[in-house]
Image (cartoon, helix red, strand yellow):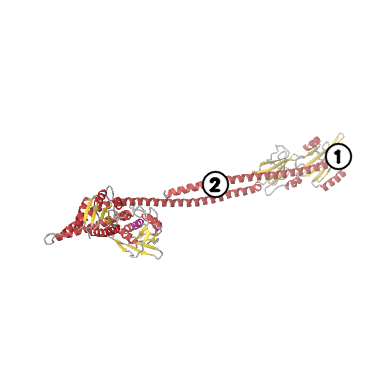
Amino acid sequence: MDQQGYRALRLRMAGAIVAFSLIPLCVLGSFIYSRFSMTYAEKIEGGLRIIVGNKRTAIDMFLEERIAQLRNLAMTNDLDRMGDKEFLSRVFDVIQSGSKSFIDLGVIDQDGSHVAYVGPYELGDVNYSGEAWFNEAMLRGVHVSNVFMGFRNFPHIIIAVTRREGDHTWILRATIDSEVFDSLVRSVQLGLGGDAFLVGADGRLQTTARFNGPVLTPVPAPVDQLFSGERIQNLTLGGQKVLAGLAWLNHAPWLLVVTEDPGEAMSPLLRTQSMVIGLVLGGLAVIVTGALLVTRATTAKIMRADQEKAALDASLVQSGKMAALGKLAAGIAHEVNNPLTLIRESAGWIKDLLTDEDPESMVNYDEIAEVVDKIEHHVDRAKTVTHRMLGFARRMEPVHEKVDLGAVAEQTIAFLETEANYRCIEILRKLDPNLPVIHSDTAQIQQVLLNILENAIDAVDRDGCIEVTTGKGKDGFVWLSVVDSGPGIPPEIRDKLYDPFMTTKPPGEGTGLGLSIAYSIVGKLGGTIGMESEPGHGAKFTVRLPVGQA
Amino acid sequence: METTRVLIVDDEKDFLDLFMKRMVRRNLDVHAVTSGPEALEYLAANEVDVVVLDVKMPGMDGIETLREIKKRHPHLEVIMLTGHGSVDSGLKGMSLGAYDYVMKPFTIDDLLERIQKARERVDINRGKAR
């Protein structure tokens, strides 16, 4: 797999982890939020319902008291008494001492004219027979008016009660400053943005609202709906959506409206919302970070495993190749050995026969003897070649044996010397003759040395020298170093020196496996491999191998 | 000392001829055969001191022949001729009772020396047997 493949794998893994963690996280977050908002809305509505109910009762009670007060007066005194201005004035003083909300008090005859009047206005000669409230009061016996400006020219309401004495009817009418309702309602104007007001059946404000204008301003309250008890409803007031508690009064045709400041009421909810979002985002950040870290570590591990596998595969292929080569070499060597023996024996026989001859009488005696010697000499040469080939074949089998590192180095150098000579590269040997025999695997060591030496020859290329040195360390290790006079190894590739498929040779010429295989073999044999290089001054590879058991 | 009687077993005729000529010249009583069964046949009929046995032969190979010889003629000493550069087959022969092994191509004097030593050993074996 290439780098892109690993990146894709990493992204896929991270994506899966994030997706699968995010789904429950979001579900949980939205569930918590919805439950909370539901509960919270219920709580707010409940609170509003209680406030509206209580306030409605309070206002109703106020109105009821006033009506009862007037009715008591009207029922206990006849028109003659009430028509007496002095008496009325006294009564008014008594009433006003109990409640300042009474502005004036009047007794009106059934024709609409004032019989008596006590109050700050000069209304003695006003006739009410044309007023709506007068007719209403005459008809129903009790009347509570909407707020109006009237003759007095300031907002007030009228409470009128009718007394029937025989066939004569008169009305006791009191004016109440509507300010009193303002103060009654104002106490439930909640928080910074809450409002509370009364709305008449005509849709006009009966009290000064906090945000919706002064008294008598029309407001878009749902006055067309009639209902008993309290109702919670979303209203749009002054262009803003608010949660409103509504209740109709019993003693006046007024709708009590209490609104919550939407921002204030819902601010805990908004806080929760932002907290939930924050938590989800925080969780997301943690999950993403975790996923990235985990997947990076995992892909790194996979990458390493793949590389190790590639190196292993390569080394298996390599050793398979070497084994096949070894068999071939052994076959050839064996087949060549027999004719060599024959040649040698033949030469030997000629030598034997020459001893019978008289050197003096035989013309070419010396020449023949010399040639026979040469034949023997060259058979010996051929013998070393076949023996080396057989030795090479034998070493393909994995073994644990006594290894003379110096001899192995000598043999390996001999393999490559022809090639080196051809390129005018001199291989110098500085082999320690007193090197202890180590317990290891000759074939594997030879493979390592072969790879390093081949690299050294390739690095030098032409006209240079390679120095092979062996020695004994103090720590139960022997070492072998190969120093070449090549261009050295640039610092940027030193980290990747032992990576599989790392090569500086042109494509197709190097497998990039030599040092990788060497590294893994040396590791398996319990040794180490190290490199020192100064660019321009060649490279030095040192292999250290344990001596092993004696 | 009596002449050492040597039986050489090798499948290569040319080699046998040369070997015989050279050994006879060195005053050895040499007989040559070209296969394991022939060798066993000859040994059954003739008195021999040392057998020089090629490891690699068609049919019955050297190791097999060696096993058979050692079974039938335990006092004989056998020198293995190995074409395998490896010491393995030689060592295997040794473990089966061969006296020594020589790698091809060999020098005649080296082989001669080993044959003489084997002969001494045979004398000792016979002395004990007697």
Residue furthest right in the image: A80
Q: Residues within 10 Å of mark 2 (few under 14, many from 20)?
A: some
Of residues B57 and A185, the one nearer the viewer is B57
- The picture places residue A322, in percent across and down from the top left corner, at 33, 52
The answer to whether residue A220 is magenta is no
- The picture places residue A111, in percent across and down from the top left corner, at 83, 36
Subunit bearing disc 2:
A
Q: Is residue A106 visible?
A: no
Please state which amino acid type lies under the numbered disc 2.
Answer: Leu
Looking at the rendering, the stretch of residues picked out in magenta corresponds to A443-451
Residue furthest front in the image: B130
Please state which amino acid type lies under the numbered disc 1.
Answer: Met
Magenta region, mostly helix, strand or loop? helix
Name the residue beneath numbered marker 1: A75
Of residues A33 and A474, the one nearer the viewer is A474
Name the residue beneath numbered marker 2: A22
Q: Residues within 10 Å of mark 1 (few under 14, many from 20)?
A: some
- The picture places residue A428, in percent across and down from the top left corner, at 30, 63
